[in-house]
Image (spheres, rainbow, N blue to C red):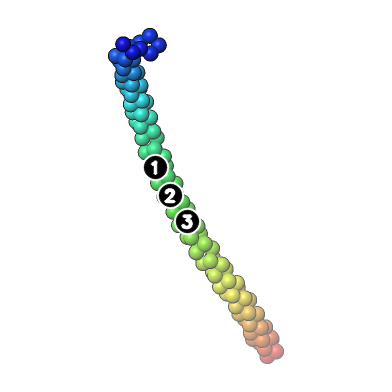
Amino acid sequence: MHSIAGYSWDELLAIVTIFSIVGGFLIWLLNLAIKNGTEKLSNVVQDLIVKIDNLSHTMDSIKSTANRTADRVDLLEERFEEHIGEAKVRNQRIKALEHEVFERGKDK
């Protein structure tokens, strides 16, 4: 009968079968552990990515609103300066009229 390293073909096939079954079971167990561990992690990472996208969208909205508000404030400041200028002109005209009216009253 043929033999390798003192083992017959039947014994060698039994050893290979046992190692294959044990190795396959260990690989299946490791694969199961990795899938379950990383599946939860990937779900958490996916949720984090969605939240970051939402935060980015919210920040863009805030930036857009802030820019529009800044533009409106600039416009209002310009209008306010115009009104101040107009008020100064009116005050000068009022003072001139008061001076003219009260100076005429003193002459009589």
The amino acid on which the numbered mark 3 sits, given as a three-letter code, is Asp
Q: Residue at x 33, y 24 (%)?
A: 24
Asked whether residue 87 is in view, the answer is no
Disc 2, SS = helix
Q: Which marked residue is nearer to the observer: mark 1 or mark 3?
A: 1
**Location of residue 40 by image quarter:** top left
State left or right for residue 88 relative to residue 70: right
Disc 3, SS = helix
The circle drawn on residue 46 is 1
Q: Residue furthest right?
A: 107
The amino acid on which the numbered mark 1 sits, given as a three-letter code, is Gln
Q: Residue at x 31, y 17 (%)?
A: 13
Precedes in sequence: disc 1 or disc 2: 1
Tell me where residue 91 appears, x and y as whole percent. Answer: 62, 78
Q: Which marked residue is nearer to the observer: mark 1 or mark 2?
A: 1
Return the residue nearer the eye: 44 or 77. Answer: 44
The circle drawn on residue 60 is 3
Q: Residue at x 59, y 75 (%)?
A: 82
Tell me where residue 59 appears, x and y as whole percent. Answer: 47, 53
Residue 40 lies, with reference to residue 85, above or below; the image says: above
Residue 21 lies, with reference to residue 48, above or below; the image says: above
Q: Residue at x 39, y 42 (%)?
A: 46
Using the numbered discs, state the Cα–Cα distance from disc 2 to disc 3 in whole angstroms: 11 Å
Q: Quadrant of the N terminus?
A: top left
Q: Which residue is mark 2?
A: 53
Tell me where residue 19 appears, x and y as whole percent. Answer: 35, 18
Residue 2 lies, with reference to residue 34, above or below; the image says: above
Tell me where residue 72 appears, x and y as whole percent. Answer: 51, 67
